[in-house]
């Protein structure tokens, strides 16, 4: 429910920004570049000592898309990106973030895999995750570690 409210509010805000852009003030809206933000990030406390999964949603409010090209973290020697289709997961070298859209990593779907763990993430801690995009540069996310069985209630 909270997610739905936030999405409606964001839609209203985007409309207001578009109007501002029409008045000629320039940079208020971004018709030709991505405007990325991240929410709903979490890591279920891993059962395994050397691997963990992570999930998040990347939203692009801008008029151009972008590509998530790599992910890194302080706790992992390597972070890989996977898609899941028909129960089979495939490692991907990049994911598209659509203009005015979202790229969603969630349980059972796209996910991040933290490999070669330097420490075991524990519930209540946060993990620093650095996302690299083809055009927008870097975004750093503090990803909370949740219980192993945690499932977020999502609005989508
Ligand atoms: Cu995987």
Image (cartoon, rainbow, N blue to C red):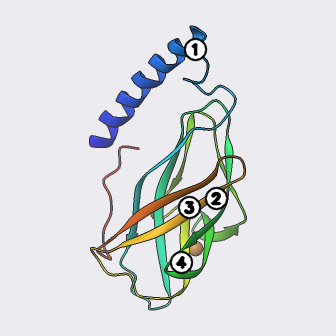
Whether label 4 touches label 1, CB < 8 Å: no
**Residue mark closest to the camera, 1 vs 2:** 1
Q: Is residue 106 among what the camera can see?
A: no
Badge 3, how many Cα within 10 Å: few under 14, some, many 20+?
Answer: many
Quarter of the image with the C terminus is top left
Q: Earlier in the sequence, mark 4 or mark 2?
A: 4
Which mark identifies residue 25? Answer: 1
Separation (CA) of disc 1 from disc 3: 38 Å
Q: Position of residue 26 (x, y in %)?
A: 61, 18
- In the picture of the structure, the residue carrying the numbered disc 4 is 114
Separation (CA) of disc 1 from disc 2: 30 Å
**Residue mark closest to the camera, 4 vs 2:** 2
Label 3 residue SS: loop
- In the picture of the structure, the residue carrying the numbered disc 3 is 110
Q: Position of residue 18 (x, y in %)?
A: 53, 17
Q: Position of residue 87 (x, y in %)?
A: 57, 68
Asked if residue 100 lies left or right of residue 142, the reply is right
Q: Where is residue 86 in the image (x, y as percent from the top left)?
A: 60, 64
Q: Earlier in the sequence, mark 2 or mark 3?
A: 3
- In the picture of the structure, the residue carrying the numbered disc 2 is 132
**Residue mark closest to the camera, 1 vs 3:** 1
Q: Is residue 34 among what the camera can see?
A: yes
Residue 146 location, quadrant: bottom left
Q: Earlier in the sequence, mark 4 or mark 1?
A: 1
Badge 4, how many Cα within 10 Å: few under 14, some, many 20+?
Answer: many
In this rendering, the answer to whether 80 lies above or below 67 is below
Q: Residue at x 64, y 29 (%)?
A: 63
Separation (CA) of disc 4 from disc 3: 13 Å
């Amino acid at each position: 429910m909270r997610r739905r409210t936030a999405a409606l509010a964001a839609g209203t805000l985007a409309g207001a920004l578009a109007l501002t852009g029409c008045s000629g003030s320039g940079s208020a809206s971004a018709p030709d570049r991505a405007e990325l933000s991240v929410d709903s990030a979490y890591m279920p406390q891993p059962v395994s000592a050397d691997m963990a999964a992570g999930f998040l949603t990347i939203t692009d409010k801008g008029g151009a898309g972008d590509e998530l090209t790599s992910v890194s973290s302080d706790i992992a020697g390597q972070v890989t990106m996977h898609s899941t289709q028909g129960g089979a997961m495939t490692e991907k070298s990049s994911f598209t973030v659509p203009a005015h859209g979202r790229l969603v990593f969630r349980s059972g779907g796209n996910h991040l895999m933290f490999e070669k763990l330097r420490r075991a993430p524990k519930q209540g801690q946060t993990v620093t995750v650095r996302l690299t995009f083809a055009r927008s540069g870097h975004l750093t996310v503090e990803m909370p570690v949740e219980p192993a069985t945690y499932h977020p209630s999502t609005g989508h």
